[in-house]
Amino acid sequence: MRRSVSIVGAGIGAEHAAGYAALPERFNIHSICELDTVRGQALADRYPGANVVSDINAVLDDPEVDIVDVCLPPHLHFSNVVRVLEAGKIAVCEKPLVASLDEADRLAEAVARTGGTVAPVFQYRYGLGTAQLHALIEAGLAGRCFVGTLETHWDRDAAYYAIPWRGTWAGERGGALLGHAIHIHDLLPWLIGPVAQVFADTATRVNGIETEDCAALAIRMESGALISSSVTLGAAGNSSRLRLCFEGFTVESDHSPYALAAKGWTFTARAPSRQADIDAVLAGVGTARSGFAGMFEALADALDGTGGREVTLADGRRSLEFVTAAYASARSGAPVRLPLTADHPMYRSWLPDPAD
């Protein structure tokens, strides 16, 4: 089935549009909803038939629109995703999905009430690299994961923070942990199971902003695997990296900051005699759509009844639980165990107390 999409926000929405356009048999870009109609028109002009509207109410009232893709600043996500659901549309929403576990649970209630669908955005999951790793795990060649390292080393200068809502707790709802490293942290439970504990330290060292732009995390998985994560927005250039040491091999990802899995990853057998077995499995992994196109393909499959690879609302909540635990640890100076329950002090908000 081919579905019509309206993209709300022409910033990161431009990348989403390219993802939908890569799947013309599954999606049609119906419209761009953007207060800055000049910017909106410039994006719409790339896609024949797409029009520009400046009022989201027009999108919600349009019976031709099936999917509303929310690409707005984080503080606007919850209210607008609920409106999309209540209008009977499918909601796609950029990260962070919402701004607290409380909002995530209220969003789940809205889904139950409306019978709708919410698709959080985690495009890092899709591509050849992750397909290769999954194939090796399914072939029984991985075994237990012992340790791993994650790096989110990006460059964000004062010009990036010239947009008023960025770098603020009120507008962005968080810093590098919430807006940048959230993608690579999402890969952990997806690849090697649930997180059991996080011990985090954060700092603001690069720019004169309210939120953190550096972090160091020690993560224990339920499986016992130990993971370290290094985060900064003060690197020379932009790169991300995942390296995991399994019983059977060590894997290192590509370093692309925005499409980590688009290219093949490097797999080195722990026992050299098993390299041929690993290479044989890798040779059988076909091409895989990466990034937004891969994510939207998985969404279309799920909507058509052949799901299993899509990002779910539960995935979005899990990512926010991790962020909540990381902020709680950074402020308390102690490790925080997961899962978090509704009586956790940061369940309703991780925003700092203005009096502090």
Image (cartoon, helix red, strand yellow):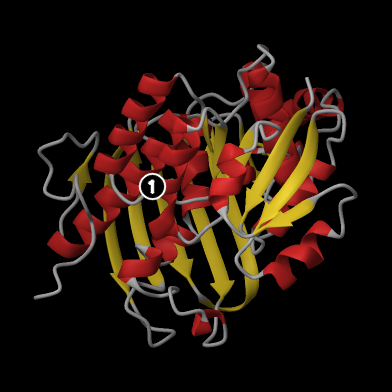
Classify residue 181 as left or right of residue 309.
left
- Residue beneath disc 1: 79
The N terminus, quarter of image: top right
Let me know if residue 228 appears in the view: yes
In the image, residue 50 sits, relative to residue 247, either above or below, namely below
- The residue at the point 42 percent across, 56 percent down is 76
x, y percent for residue 89? 56, 31
The C terminus, quarter of image: bottom left
Q: Residues within 10 Å of mark 1 (few under 14, many from 20)?
A: few
Dot 1 amino acid type = Ser
Classify residue 37 as left or right of residue 26.
left
- The residue at the point 45 percent across, 18 percent down is 115
Furthest residue to the top?
Answer: 305
x, y percent for residue 95? 49, 50
Observer-nearest of 277 and 45: 45
x, y percent for residue 239? 64, 65
